[in-house]
Image (tube, rainbow, N blue to C red):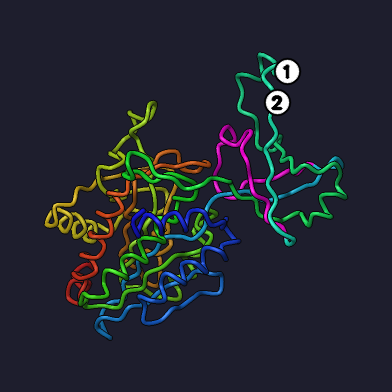
Amino acid sequence: MDQVTVMMKELTELDGISGFEQEVHDKLKQLLEPVSDEIIKDRLGSIIGVKKGLEHGPRVLVAGHLDEIGFMVTHITDKGFLRFEQVGGWWSHTVLAQRLRIKSRKGDYVGIVGSKPPHVITAEERTKVVPLKELFIDVGASSKEEVKEMGIQIGDPVVPISDFFTMRNGELWAGKAIDNRVGCALAAETLRRLQAEEHPNIVFAGATVQEEVGLRGAATTANLVQPDIAIAIDVGVAQDTPGLENLHGSSNVGEGPLIMLFDSSTIAHMKLRNLVLDTAEELGIPVQLNVQLGGGTDAGKFHLQGIGCPSIAIGFATRYIHSHQAIMAKQDFEYAVSLVTALIKKLDKETVEQLT
């Protein structure tokens, strides 16, 4: 594997649901330290590397988010099964029979989400999606007491088990938590590429916490950084699989980064949007314009910082997000790093004043 793919493998295979991002935080800190002038953090766990170009230049924030979707233990039955609740958005259809990792204070345990054999499913049940509240996790225990002896308790985080792998001779990345460890990777890689480059600003690149449960770390990070311009890095729903062809907009794996124009949390800043599109055209980077009525990115909080911060989200068409497995194209990542790096080099004081 090449360096960037190894970085993605290491990041995605770490466990870090919303509110429990410490493993990912520590790894990103390790990646940012060699390419940053300093590291800053908010009090929730977001982490940002700072690279200074012109001391009094604009403050440019580029951020993914550390957290992935997962679950939390909410009840232990008398027979030792775990009830659980989602942390972030899940379609319960994807959860049945999957392996999960329960992270207790005494260590990690593998559990299996229980499912009925087809032999005992009624005709009516076959037509329904099982509600998440009816699912349970089997950790091999025989009683509530045995579960407690294992150290598992209510409030423990539960994470999908899924190894990172590549497809199509390394062109595609696959695994869990691509949403949004790819944003973490892009922040680190952008700072690495800026090491030999001059830029007329101060760059703040890193990742927030608790994006999947309401963009919470984005609010505290924006308060910490007080950016003049913000770029959120995230994934978007790929529309190139059967059944999704009629959605509005373009979002195909491998056809360039997504420029997210509108979602439930943000309308992309018009002048910043135009600068992004003009820069992509100058560089010959293919991009896809994306409009998505549901979901949101950290740009939803970034753009509300102070008296307003021109913000945009740049992302990646990704198949099967918010499940145990997702697929995106490495080439889209490479294009996005080049685009974001070029944007940063353009964002001098005069340009930012014109944008605002």
Q: Are marks 1 and 2 in contact (CB under 8 Å)?
A: yes
Tag 2 residue: 116
Which residue reaches farthest top? 123
Relative height, residue 286 to residue 308 (above, below): above
Relative height, residue 197 to residue 259 (above, below): below
Q: Secondary structure at mark 1?
A: helix
What residue range appears in magenta?
81-104
Q: Is residue 126 left or right of residue 325?
A: right
- Badge 1 amino acid: Val
The residue at the point 44 percent across, 78 percent down is 39
Q: Is residue 89 magenta?
A: yes
The residue at the point 65 percent across, 50 percent down is 158
The residue at the point 19 percent across, 54 percent down is 277
Q: Nearer the viewer, residue 59 or 309?
A: 59
Tag 1 residue: 120
Q: Nearer the viewer, residue 2 or 199?
A: 2
Q: Position of residue 181 (x, y in %)?
A: 44, 56
